[in-house]
Amino acid sequence: MKSVFSAFAPAVATALALTLVLPVAARASNDLPPLREVEEIDRNMLWVALAIEISDKCDQIAPRNLKGLLVLNDLRGQARDLGYSNAQIEEYATSDAEKARMRELGEQYVKSQGLDPDVTADLCSLGSAEIARNSRIGALLKAK
């Protein structure tokens, strides 16, 4: 005859496993560096941001919306695969501080190309050059 306790053994084992694993999973999530420090995510977010800025400012250049959405979806998937939660990803993507930092990085990139980020014609020149060399930025843009 089975003991009453043996019927509960699987449930107890499951509860014990969850008790031990969940704090480790939560701790692992907290041990992750901020997404801004994950080069493969942050650098690609910069390219997307620059493509958006160029297409917003330059009438001769349009965004490749579907391609941009696919890139963003891929970045979200990469972040999830690295252990980031949807909340962490959303915070990174919508944070005003991150947007300001991304704008600064974008301006630095434009200046590094010998152009002025405040001059629309320079953004159009950059967009055309990026399209011509099919760069990460250029792949997100198309000439009208």
Image (cartoon, rainbow, N blue to C red):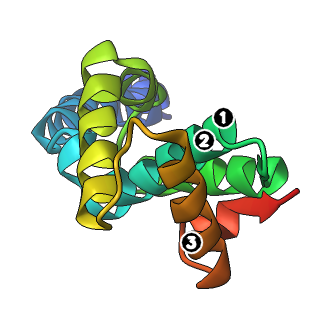
**130 left or right, relative to 79:** right
The residue shown at (28%, 31%) is 22
Q: Do the residues labelled 2 and 1 touch (CB within 8 Å)?
A: yes
Amino acid marked by disc 1: Asp
Name above or below for residue 5 compared with residue 120.
Answer: above
Q: Are marks 1 and 3 in contact (CB under 8 Å)?
A: no
Task: Return the residue at label 3.
Answer: 130
Task: Return the residue at label 2.
Answer: 52
* Front-lying residue, 42 or 64: 64
Residue projecting furthest to the bottom: 133
Task: Return the residue at label 1.
Answer: 56
Measure the C-alpha gap from mark 2 to mark 3: 13 Å
Name above or below for residue 116 compared with residue 47.
Answer: above
**40 left or right, relative to 66:** left
Amino acid marked by disc 2: Ile
Residue projecting furthest to the top: 96
Dot 2 alpha-carbon crowd within 10 angstroms: few under 14, some 14 to 19, many 20 or more = many
Image location of residue 75, percent across then percent down: 52, 53
* Front-lying residue, 11 or 5: 11
Q: Earlier in the sequence, mark 2 or mark 3?
A: 2
Secondary element at tag 1: helix
Measure the C-alpha gap from mark 2 to mark 1: 6 Å
Within the image, what quadrant is residue 41 found in? bottom left
Secondary element at tag 2: helix
Secondary element at tag 3: helix
The residue shown at (54%, 70%) is 136
**46 left or right, relative to 111:** right
Image location of residue 122, percent across then percent down: 48, 53
